[in-house]
Amino acid sequence: NLDPGKSQDVQGVSRSDIGLYCSFMDFVISGYLFYMIHAFSWDQNKNLEEKKGHATTTRDFSVKVTNIPEIVLEPEDFIDYFSEFGLVVDVAILYNRSRLVALHVKRRELKSRKIGKLGQLGDELMKLVKLQKDELAQVEKEIAEIRADEASKRPVVAYVTFSTINERNACINSHFYSNFLGGGNRFF
């Protein structure tokens, strides 16, 4: 029979002491839980910051190929050579087509240029229209020549992408890859 008005002992411990012990235990458990939550969130934030520092991209799986021989024109040529290091999943080839791009821009500008209305043209304007048509024909001819020229189709740079980072690293660490990375060396 525990009467709140009376201070009775339970196995030799007073009720006020039991209350103090319970309060102390609540405080210790709360502190422990606070510490564990804080430690867990700190660990999660640390992992998140580490992951932000290095997101996996295709660059992690690819090698850049330069000094490409004239005989290499197709992606299959790169696949055949680099498959000894692992599974090649993609080949991106870049060509130097800056002259062709400049000619296309010039052609667009010439086609968009308007010189008066056809019914109101005098002799001077007719000469300008003829010059513009001649210039446009010259640009069209140059574009056709560049497209037909095999040398303009030569790759300048290629990116070979492997299926795993380990395969990429095997390629980079190989003797063959170091040969074509160096000045003037080729990979074939």
Image: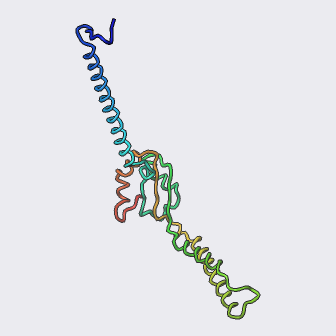
| Looking at the image, residue 47 lies above or below residue 76 | above
Residue 141 image point, x, y percent: 62, 78
Residue 166 image point, x, y percent: 39, 45
Q: Residue furthest bottom?
A: 123
Q: Residue furthest front?
A: 5
Give the number of marks.
0
Q: Quadrant of residue 113?
A: bottom right
Q: Quadrant of residue 64?
A: bottom left
Residue 63 image point, x, y percent: 42, 54
Q: Residue furthest right?
A: 119
Q: How is the image coloured?
A: rainbow
| Looking at the image, residue 105 lies above or below residue 134 | above
Residue drawn at (44%, 46%), measured in percent from left and top?
A: 86
- For the residue pair 107 and 72, the one nearer the viewer reads as 107
Q: Is residue 152 left or right of residue 178?
A: right
| Looking at the image, residue 148 lies above or below residue 60 | below
Q: Is residue 167 left or right of residue 149?
A: left
- Image quadrant holding the C terminus, namely bottom left
- For the residue pair 58 and 93, the one nearer the viewer reads as 58
| Looking at the image, residue 31 lies above or below residue 107 | above
Residue 117 image point, x, y percent: 73, 85
- For the residue pair 37 and 79, the one nearer the viewer reads as 37
Residue drawn at (67%, 91%), measured in percent from left and top?
A: 127
Q: Is residue 92 left or right of residue 51?
A: right
- Image quadrant holding the N terminus, namely top left
Residue drawn at (32%, 35%), measured in percent from left and top?
A: 39
Q: Residue furthest top?
A: 1
